[in-house]
Amino acid sequence: MASTSEEERGQSRFIMTANHGFAPFAQEELRRLFGSVKSTVLVSGEVFLVTVSYSWQEAVEMITNQAPIFVRHIQPVQCEIAIDNLATGLEQLKSFVMQQNELNGATVSLQVRKTEDSLSEQSAGALREQLLSEFSELNAQFIVQDAEWILSVLVSSDHIYAGVSYPKDNISDWSGGAVRFQREDGQISRAKFKLLEAEKTFGIDFSAFHHALDIGAAPGGWTSFLLERGMHVTAVDPALMHESLKGHAQLKIMRKNASEVKFRDNQFDLLVCDMSWSPKQMVRLVKDLLYALSPGGTAIVTVKLMHKKPMALIREVIASFEEANMQLQYAKQLFHNRDEITLHMIKY
């Protein structure tokens, strides 16, 4: 079992997770933040074990203040067990957990992950159930979400990594930052999940908006979400909207290109755009319609990363919007983003 010598030397270890294929950019963000970073691949392009020359709390504070774009989730590694026998390793893990006094009398979310080559042949869910049984002697109430503490466990081919942390310190309180939503009957597309995740991650109260403009709306995944939140929505797209949206009392559909429409000044308090266009075209179209967004209004747009240098592209896009009196609140690659990021901006 690993000792606490890293913390005593002012070092900490944690597991970093990014969307698949984007871990190199998350690592670059960490290098810019911490300077020297040692890392070991746990899941190619997605999950890394990281060592930095700061304590866990120092590292958490630095990451929180920096708000990285591609780092989706972190979890502390306070216990590292080398294993060639899973049962023995789990006994050592139990010993570590039983020593965590802060968990006594607390609500705890046990989050269990495993790599594809993990020594455990069980699913992560089945392994979690086994561990819950093993930890039954602990005076804690195990719940799924909104717990006081998170107990994180990751099992690889030769190690068990574990740590205890506050939910806010993990960037996301979902296991590995994988924010899951249940697909609903009649749901138009999975694009809706992006706004659901943005609502939670960015702390946006969508029900507070009244008039929304959805640019490039078809087939209507985002439009349907906005209507559910009680807004009047103007949807702009030359393509057809989903049949289920037709005739909605609070929806106006404009089958035109975004470059062809005209609105009143300050007509909308929310503007959203999730078009599969090049970033420069998207920025131009959105900027040309910002006159219709009222001061203090919110814009949520996705930026497609059709570029080998996404960091430079993102800086260019943000700078262009800032020139148009848009103040960036968040730039984040959400779990439900693919080769894109989501921007949350407010007009001033």
Image: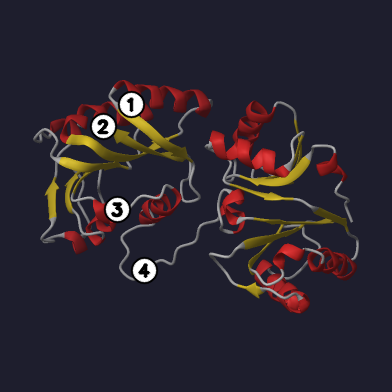
Query: Which-is-in-front pick, marks 2 and 1?
Result: 1
Residue 68 seen in this snapshot: no
Q: Which residue is mark 3?
A: 206
Lower sequence index among marks 4 and 2: 4
For the residue marked with disc 1, what is the amino acid? Phe
Element assignment for label 4: loop
Element assignment for label 3: helix
Q: Which residue is mark 1?
A: 321
**Image location (x, y in percent) of residue 39:** 76, 38
Q: Nearer the viewer, residue 19 or 78?
A: 78
Please give the label number shown on residue 286. 2
How far separated are the C-alphas under marks 4 and 2? 30 Å
Please give the label number shown on residue 335. none
Lower sequence index among marks 2 and 1: 2
Q: In the figure, is residue 162 to the left or right of 69? A: right
Lower sequence index among marks 1 and 4: 4
Asked if the residue under mark 1 is in contact with the one under mark 2, i.e. CB atoms within 8 Å, the reply is yes
Element assignment for label 2: helix
- Residue sitting at x 48%, y 28%: 307
How far separated are the C-alphas under marks 1 and 4? 34 Å
